[in-house]
Amino acid sequence: MIKPDKWIKKMALENKMIEPFEQSQVRKGISFGVSCYGYDMRVANEFKIFTGANTSFIDPKNFEAKSFQEITVEDHILLPPNSFALARSVEYFRIPRTILTVCFGKSTYARCGVLVNVTPFEPEWEGFVTMSISNTAPLPVKVYANEGIAQVLFLESNEACEISYADKKGKYQAQQQITLPKI
């Protein structure tokens, strides 16, 4: 049996599953790269911080883009208390047909009241990951660009799925930027 970290390296290099791909854990700032059983992805320097301006409620079927303040930073954002931001990963993912992923926020942020929500990457989904970063703390929290934000775990099946995300022409396929809800 191949060791999990070696399996991730093999899949990433042979299938261009993660680009750019860091073959070991980088411990500069909040860590990223290959870990024992997964890959710690980074958050890019582009954010959409929810302000709630010009809206009295959030409707996922008719989402108001003007409810966000778009910012690009060099180092970090200051995420307001009890708020959230949308962001994207630094890495571009191409998930093979036999793989499903789940993703969890890194403990460094969780211990500060920051929750990272990313839905599973389905078989044959590809793109930059759009993630929701929530600050549940009563104070602003720094979120550092180009550093680790969440760990992706890869679950492999011994047979390919019948209908992949690409087969069903998923609405978030090959996203290149932070993507708002779509119907």
Image (cartoon, rainbow, N blue to C red):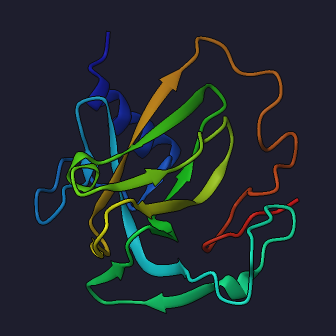
Q: Residue furthest left?
A: 28
Q: Residue at x 43, y 67 (%)?
A: 82
Decide if residue 36 is on the left or right side of residue 57.
left
The relative height of residue 5 versus residue 78 in the rendered view (above or below) is: above
Give the camera-side residue of 113 and 131: 113
The quadrant of the image that shows the C terminus is: bottom right
Decide if residue 156 is on the left or right side of residue 151.
right
Give the camera-side residue of 166 and 151: 151
The relative height of residue 55 versus residue 9 in the rendered view (above or below) is: below
The relative height of residue 98 versus residue 57 in the rendered view (above or below) is: above
Q: Quadrant of residue 121?
A: top right
Q: Residue at x 58, y 31 (%)?
A: 100
The quadrant of the image that shows the N terminus is: top left
Q: How many numbered callouts?
A: 0
Q: Position of residue 3 (x, y in %)?
A: 26, 20
Q: Residue at x 50, y 46 (%)?
A: 17
Give the camera-side residue of 72 and 142: 142
Q: Position of residue 46 (x, y in %)?
A: 47, 81
Q: Residue at x 16, y 56 (%)?
A: 26
Q: Position of residue 144 (x, y in %)?
A: 27, 73
Q: Position of residue 77 (x, y in %)?
A: 34, 82
